[in-house]
Image (cartoon, rainbow, N blue to C red):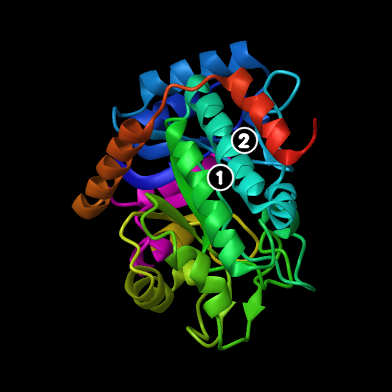
Amino acid sequence: MKAAIVGISGQELTAGERALLRACPPAGVILFGRNVADPLQLAALVADLRRVLSAGAVLAVDQEGGRVARLRPPHWLGHPPAGAIGARFLENPAAGLRAAWLTGALIGGQCLGTGFDVVCAPVLDVRTPGASDVVGDRAFGESAADVARLGRAAAQGLLAGGVQPVMKHAPGHGRARVDSHESLPRVEANDLERDFSPFRANMDMPWAMTAHILYTGLDPDRPATLSPLVIGRVIRGMMGFDGVLVSDDLAMGALQGDPAARALGALAAGCDLALYCPGDAEGTEAVLRACPDVTSRAAGRLRRSRVLAAARRLPLDPDRMAAARDRALGTV
């Protein structure tokens, strides 16, 4: 399998996509709102993807709750943003932690039942006053300690639902003053303990996603996704993360260069997998043909993550859990 996760263009595979995924099998496919219409359509697409992809490939989705959700009402249960859970935690810590776990478990069970095995959540960025709202209410709050606790609860819920959680965006996106989808944020601060600590506290999570942030005190030349210094010394070194490390979407405006060069740069910096999301035929093919196969170390990390999710899965009653979450959030 190629060391890449890629998007597709629409609600069904095109003939070209099917041929490319067979010729250059990726480590996974990630789906977005453009790929989802209703349960019947999604089930058919997932079944088609599973027929085409390699046995060990993952199907991933961004399903944080709030504004970042690909499975939405009326076909699927809606979920609150992390910020609402964090606000409840400030009122009642036990209720907030319960709501975080239940939301994770509900999302996990929902996604597993739909055919996904990797969910790109929770967000462990710490909300910072004056920063871009690209994080905003996607963060659990402004306290690093609270974010660490609530993020762990949400991740444990996702595992209970049977999926592999991805903490994002390491080593911390909360200070960014511009949207990395559009341009490269620069963080000049040298004391980044507040940003790092939620990730360090959750280093046993199976997956992490990098941030397209230039931390000038760590590497003045390269954003974290492309920086061997940030990945090697901070994420793998100081933080001690030994799970699957995937880049954020390499098509974002924060980065420069063609898609293949971006993917190779992320892998050279230390990412296990390059993530390329737009689903455009030219860029997707360039990434898949350029990327090498998954390394043996990365393959081992992927196996461990699958085993962990299977071992942590619990029998869950979504109706009872949804009612319990409403009570925990104080909405009933």
Residue at left offset 41%, top offset 32%: 20
**Magenta region: which residues?**
265-294
Q: Is residue 239 left or right of residue 151?
A: left
Q: Quick check: 146 above or below 321?
A: below
Q: Amino acid at mark 2?
A: Phe
Q: Which residue is mark 2?
A: 32
Residue lying at the far left in this picture: please name it. 296
Question: Which residue is painted at 60% across and 11% down in the image?
Answer: 40
Q: Does the magenta portion include 57?
A: no
Mark number displayed over residue 277: 1
Image side of residue 233 versus residue 125, left or right = left
Residue 214 pos. (x, y %)? 57, 77
Q: Mark 2 touching mark 1, by CB under 8 A?
A: yes
Q: Is residue 293 magenta?
A: yes
Residue 89 drawn at (x, y percent): 68, 53
- The kind of secondary structure element at disc 2 is loop
Give the amino acid at mark 1.
Cys
Residue 158 in the image: state x and y as whole percent.
Answer: 49, 38
